[in-house]
Each structure stands twice: as C-alpha cells, then as structure tokens.
Amino acid sequence: MEEWKMIDPIPGDHIRVESNGYYHHGIYIGNNEVIQFGLPFDMFRNHKDIKIIKSPIEDFLNNGFLEVRIYSKKELKRKNSNEEIIRIAHSMLGQGDYNILYNNYNN
C-alpha cells in the first residue's frame, strides 16, 4: 500500500493533490514548480488539448493539500534518482494524449 504524507517536497518528489474526488499527480522540480499532465481542473477539457506542462505549485494545488509519496526501502532500491526523475519529467514537456482512465487513479 502506498504511503503519502503532508510534508514539504524536495526536487524529484512524486506529489499529489486531491481534486474533485480524484488525485492529480506531478513531479516537484524545485523553485516552487511542478511538471504535471495538465492542471487539476483540465480533466473536463478535450483530452487532445491536455499536455504535460510546467507550472507554479500554486496552480497544481488549486487550493488543495499537497501530499508527498513516501517510498519503502525496497522501492527506493528500484527508484530512479531524483535528478533522473527531473530529467525525465523535463523531457516529456509538451507531450499529450491525456486519458482520464489511464492518467489518473484513486488510491
């Protein structure tokens, strides 16, 4: 079972915020910025218009509460470094084809 805590994120952290009954996820990249698949309220837009974007953390939160993913020791052994996570997130900026069933999940 995944563990999430309301703590301050560090660059490379997987973060989420609850929005309208689902969790919106992103990668915190530092300087109060997040890379995410659209904004929390974008789920109601045409999926072809939703892209991976970089935005201020305030836009990501949309007045919600930030949670940070806490990994087990076993998961940490397999997890990419925070620097690699940030590099991968940056490389995906502008990609699209959002799907509400596959790009969001409740947990």
Image: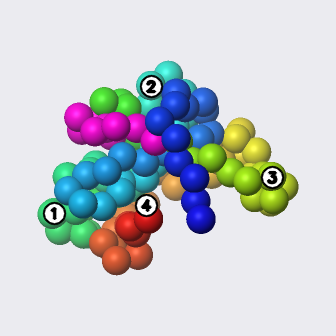
Residue visible at 84% across and 55% down in the picture: 77
Residue 100 magenta? no
Camera-near label (3 vs 1) is 3
Q: Residues within 10 Å of mark 4 (few under 14, many from 20)?
A: few
Instruction: Identify the residue under disc 1.
Output: 45
Q: Provide the residue designation for mark 2.
A: 32
Q: Between disc 1 and disc 2, whose residue precedes?
A: 2
> Residue 55 appears at what percent x and percent y?
36, 36
**Is residue 53 rendered to the left or right of residue 82?**
left
Res. 14 visible in picture: no
Mark found first going from the N terminus, 4 or 2: 2
**Res 28 visible:** yes
Nearer-N-terminus badge (3/1):
1
The residue to which callout 3 is attached is: 73
| Mark 4 residue type | Gln
How packed mark 1 is, by other alpha carbons closer than 10 Å (few <14, some 14-19, many 20 or more), is: few
Mark 3 or mark 4, whichever is nearer to me: 3
Spatial separation of the CA atoms under disc 3 and disc 1:
38 Å
Give percent across and percent down for residue 51. 34, 57
| Residue range (magenta) | 59-67
Q: Choose mark 4 or mark 1, whichever is in front.
A: 1
Marks 2 and 4: in contact by CB < 8 Å? Answer: no
Label 1 SS: loop
Q: Amino acid at mark 2?
A: Asn
Residue denoted by label 4: 95
User: Between disc 3 and disc 4, whose residue precedes?
Assistant: 3
